Amino acid sequence: MSVNLFLSSTLRQYIPGYDPSEGVLFSVDRKTTVSDLCRLMQIPQDKIKIIMINGRNASFDDELRGDERVGLFPPIGGG
C-alpha cells in the first residue's frame, strides 16, 4: 500500500530533492503507524508538531491504511 507524504517548511530538509507540489509517494506495510513512517523516512519525531491524515488531525499512533495523504508540520515560532 502507498501513502503520499507532504512535508512543511524545515521538515523538507530530510528528503533530498523533495518537491512540495508532489510530495513523496511511499510504500508501507499494513499496520504501519505514522511513527513507523517517520522512522523509515528518518524524520525525528521531536521536529513534528502537527500530523494530518487526509486533512484531519492525527497522532503518531494512527495506523495508515493506504492511499492517504499524510502531512507533517514542524512547530513554528514567531514574535
Image (cartoon, rainbow, N blue to C red):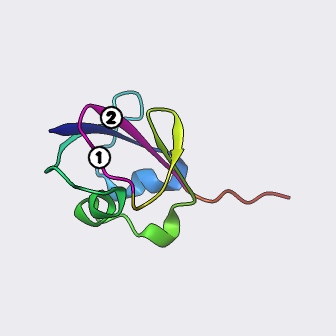
Q: Position of residue 37 (x, y in %)?
A: 28, 57
The quadrant the N terminus occupies is: top left
* Magenta run includes residue 77: no
Which residue, given by chain and number where applicable, does mark 1 sit on? 64
Q: Position of residue 41 (x, y in %)?
A: 27, 59
Q: Secondary structure at mark 2?
A: strand
The quadrant the C terminus occupies is: bottom right
19 over 40 or under it: above or below = above
Q: What residue type is disc 2 on?
A: Glu
74 over 46 or under it: above or below = above
Q: Compute the Cα span from label 2 to label 1.
A: 7 Å
Which residue corresponds to the image point at 23% horizontal and 62% vertical from the top-left? 40
Q: Position of residue 72 (x, y in %)?
A: 47, 49
Magenta residue span: 62-73
Q: Do tag 2 and tag 1 residues touch (Cβ < 8 Å)? A: yes
Q: Quadrant of residue 19?
A: top left
Q: Quick one: which residue is furthest to the top in this view?
A: 21
